[in-house]
Image (cartoon, rainbow, N blue to C red):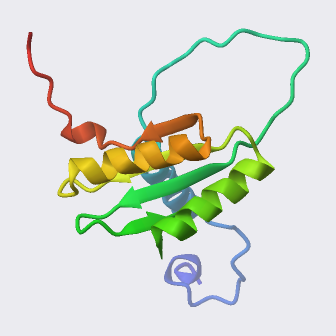
């Protein structure tokens, strides 16, 4: 019975747990998470905000308005007409005065269509809006 433990032919049960494969898998998952976490974070401008003893966490209402290359309008990804868009923005503005409109224009969209959307939301009463851009496509022209 000298070869019983090595050959596995003995009647002794396996009582030790081998955790080396588990540790290997966890380390691989950790490395994958660390590498992909850098791609999830969007670039932003760091702002040092002042502290205050009182304050509330407010969830701002934001509406994503997109102008497609052919001039179609999309509100939060759903196709919408201009009168429906006006009604929806007015409705959200009645609920929350701090509505933020995120306006995105397709690269092939007419400049006038995008400017019209900015003008439209401003005439309805929205005071906060932003233009979506792709930071990877920005080219800086030297002075």
Residue in the image at 8% along x and 14% along y: 142
Which quarter of the image is occupied by the C terminus?
A: top left
Relative to 51, residue 73 above or below: below
- The image position of residue 124, as x and y in percent, is 59, 47
| Residue located farthest toward the right when viewing the structure as drawn | 54
Residue 136 appears in which quarter of the rendering?
Answer: top left
> Could you say which is closer to the camera, residue 64 or residue 125?
125
Residue in the image at 26% along x and 49% along y: 112
- The image position of residue 62, as x and y in percent, is 61, 49
Residue 28 placement, left or right of 61: left
Relative to 83, residue 57 above or below: above
Which quarter of the image is occupied by the N terminus?
A: bottom right
| Residue located farthest toward the left when viewing the structure as drawn | 142
Residue in the image at 50% along x and 19% along y: 46
- The image position of residue 111, as x and y in percent, is 23, 47
Residue 97 appears in which quarter of the rendering?
Answer: top right
Residue 30 placement, left or right of 95: left
Q: Is residue 11 visible?
A: yes
Q: Is residue 40 visible?
A: no
């Amino acid at each position: 019975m000298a070869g019983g433990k090595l050959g596995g032919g003995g009647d002794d049960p396996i009582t030790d747990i081998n955790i080396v494969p588990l540790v290997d898998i966890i380390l691989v998952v950790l490395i994958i998470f660390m590498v992909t976490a850098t791609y999830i974070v969007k670039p932003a401008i760091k702002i040092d905000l002042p502290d205050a003893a009182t304050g509330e966490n407010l969830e701002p209402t934001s509406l994503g308005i997109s102008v497609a290359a052919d001039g179609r309008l999309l509100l939060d990804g759903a196709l919408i007409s201009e009168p429906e868009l006006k009604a929806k923005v007015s409705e959200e503005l009645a609920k929350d005065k701090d509505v933020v409109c995120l306006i995105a224009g397709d690269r092939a969209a007419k400049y006038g269509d995008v400017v019209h959307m900015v003008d439209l939301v401003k005439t309805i009463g929205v005071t906060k809006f932003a233009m979506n851009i792709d930071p990877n496509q920005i080219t800086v022209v030297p002075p």
